[in-house]
Every structure is written in structure tokens, then in C-alpha cells.
Image: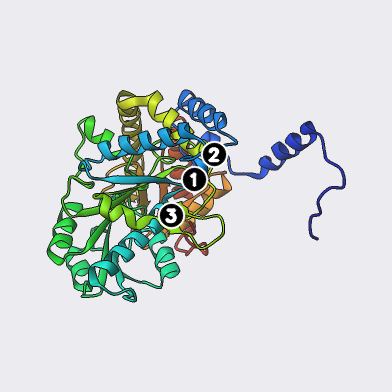
Amino acid sequence: MRTKLPERGRSHTAIIDEMRAMKHGDADWQHGRVPLFYFKADDAVYEIGKAGFFEYFSENALGATRAYPSVKRMETEVIDMALDLFGAPADAQGFMTTGGTESIVTAIQACRDWSRKQRGSAQHRGNIVASETAHPAFNKGAKLMDLEVRRAPVGPDLRMDLAAIEALIDDDTIMLVGSAPNFSYGMIDPIAALGAIAERRAVWLHVDACVGGYLAPFVRMIGRAIPDFDFRVPGVSSLSADLHKFGFCPKPSSTVLYRTADKARFQFFDETVWPNGRFLTPTIVGTRPAGGIAGAWATLQFLGVEGYQRIARELMAFVDAYRAGIGAIPGLKILGAPDLSIVAYGSDEFDVFRVAEIMAEKGWLPGLVQRPKGIHRMMSLVHAPVLQEYLDDVRAAVGVVRQSGPATSGIRATY
């Protein structure tokens, strides 16, 4: 039965009480039982981001240039900090978007239109070449723009196969894609080698650092080995990185950055087709919540380099303990060699999805990988306090699966 608008407005208390009651059926993300969707550093970071967001709760970032110079200033400063963090040259330019998908789609559009100008053909269709581990947002963008996506299988080590990638490149290729890291296994693709291919073949290279962009630089700063993945690699033309993931900023806030202003200008939508005159925006959406910009600016100002380094130390120490704990459970193994905080584990002895089913019964929302089968977690500090409880439940679930004999789970991997 369709819900109808109430005849009379309800009280504030009644509405909030019902909303809180509805939450009782939600997954318990606050106690680390959800493996993705939510990122938290600590309460102080959460509160400053929230305060910044609500300070600009009503402002519309569409009007930043004309009506809200404070919003425009914050957006510019966030982009400046991002460009500096990712080693961008002086001519680089970037924009804030509402999330990783919008950042990726706008980069695809900029690449397509730039490539068409280079080729002198407004009708060229073009194709994108990526590893099978590249985010589906590239297929979403390609579908919107009638482009082809060619995906190369990973190697036996689950890493990008550069030979397979290059074999898919032809005269119609407009973009190569690298991930930093890929979402499936948490490994950073060989961006430097991919950049060399991009330069040799004169193809645009986009780095999807939506997951790791605001974590990897600080992990490197604390002394861990992180391969070059950003504009320090000469062949990189554009890069996407989500502030609302490991930047620990409020949603929605992401960044898309370009090596040159010439390439960045192809992201703009600029039309004068209606009576109100020029409509100019670099984003897919028109109206944008200024709160996302303000919350991001406030969070970056609050943490600074030292704050992000502190989080990186704490988070990576936790990830080390998590990987060691999983590796100590007989029958389980880490898939690939994760570089940051995404870790997937599987088994050569039994169907690990059966372990996931038991974990779900215990209140853990399982993240899954389908090739090969694995249990997947993208962890932030909210997962640290329940580490031992999680490992104990995994160990117990593995014991049940081993005792029950060979069988196959019926569940499927779903993001």
C-alpha cells in the first residue's frame, strides 16, 4: 500500500522517535559490524566535520561564485590542499564533487571531449581500458556516454596484468585506468608502469584513488612503502579521491583533479540556451550541499598533516593485527598483498562464503569478493575496538564449517 502524506503535521518528538525506532533494524555500524559504507577516525574528528556541515546546512554550492564567496574560498582551499598532497604541477586544476562516481564520470567526460578535440572528430566513440578490478563507475560513465570499456583479467597474484592491459589498447583507446588501491583486493596498481604505457601510446591515464587517496600519502609519510600513484608519475592526466572516505569528512565530498588547466576545462558544462543566460558548472549536478564543502574544509583544518599521520599509524597498526589474526586461523589466507586498509581473505580448503553466512547470523554484515571467493573488509578505526571479537567469531565459524563437511554456499557477492 502506498504511503500518503499525513493530513496534519506531526510533532518533532514523534518524528525523531519513529526515526530512531526504524534504526533498530539497521546494521550496527557504530560498533564495527559493517565492513564498508562508513569511515570514522574518532569522535573529535566526527564532531568538527558535523559542525562544519551544519554551519552551511542551507547554502547551495551552485551559487558559491555569485552568492557565497565563503563557500567558494573553502572549495578552492580544499582543492589547493589536494593538489599539493598529490604532487600536482603548478598548472593543475581540480573540483569538488558529491562522490567517487561523479568524480570518475566527470573525468571520463573531460577525457572524451579532450580526445575528440585532439582527433578533430566530434563523433569518435572511443574505448576505456582497465583491469577487471576497476570500479564499476567506469562502466556507468561509459554507458552514459556510449563508450566501450575493455577489462583485462588480473594475473595469478591478483595484480593488474600490464601485458593484458596493453593488448587491449588500440587506435580508438582514449583512457587507461589504474586504481590506488583497487577495491577488490586493496592493492595499488603499478601506476608508474601504466604511466609509461600511457605516455608511449599517447593515451590519457586516470588514477582512481577514491578509496586510498587521502590515506596513502600519510601512510608513506610514516615510513611505509607506498608506490608512486599520483601526479608524481608523469603519465597521469587525472585523479579522483574521496574526502568522505579516508579523509574522514562528511558526505558528500570528493575531488577530481587534472594535471593541466587545459584538460580540466573540458569538465565544464557551459550553456546559454535559455532566457536566464549563462549556466556554467563543472559538476554533473547543479545544486550541491555547501555543507559537504564546509565539513571537508573544517576536517582538513582540524587534523592537518600531523593528525592524518596519527590516524595512519593507528589504522595501519590495527590492519597489521587484523591480517596477522586472520592468517593465524587454519584454512584462511589473505588474498593478494594489500597496501592499505582493504583486506580480503579466502580459503583453498572450503567455501569461505559459508563462513560469511555464519558471521551474518552473529550480526556481522559480510562484504564479499566473488573471484576468487573471499570475505572483504574496508576498515577504519571504528573496527579496531571489536578486533578480537571479530577474530573469535571467524575462528568459531571456520570450526563449524570444517566440522560440517564439504558444501557450497548459496549466497552471492553484492556491493
Q: CA distance from mark 3 to mark 1?
A: 14 Å
Residue type at the position of mark 3: Thr
How crowded pointer 3 is (Cα within 10 Å; few <14, some 14-19, many 20+) is rated as: many
Q: CA distance from mark 2 to mark 1?
A: 9 Å
Indicate the secondary structure of the residue bearing disc 1.
Answer: loop
Question: In the image, what residue occupies the spot 38% across and 46% down?
Answer: 95
Indicate the secondary structure of the residue bearing disc 3.
Answer: helix
For this rendering, which residue is in front, 283 or 329?
283
323 horizontally vs 384: left or right:
left
308 vs 349: above or below: above
**Residue 251, which numbered label?**
none
255 horizontally vs 36: left or right:
left
Q: Are marks 2 and 3 in contact (CB under 8 Å)?
A: no
Q: Assign the N terminus to one quadrant of the image.
A: bottom right
Residue type at the position of mark 1: Phe
**Identity of the residue furthest to the right in this view:** 7
User: Would you name the residue on which mark 1 appears?
Assistant: 37
Q: Are marks 2 and 1 in contact (CB under 8 Å)?
A: yes
Question: In the image, what residue occupies the spot 28% across and 40% down?
Answer: 83
- In x, y percent, where is residue 314? 34, 28
**Residue 29, which numbered label?**
2
Q: Of circles 3 and 1, which is in front?
A: 3
User: Would you name the residue on which mark 3 appears?
Assistant: 101
Question: In the image, what residue occupies the spot 47% across and 64% down?
Answer: 407
- In x, y percent, where is residue 189? 24, 54
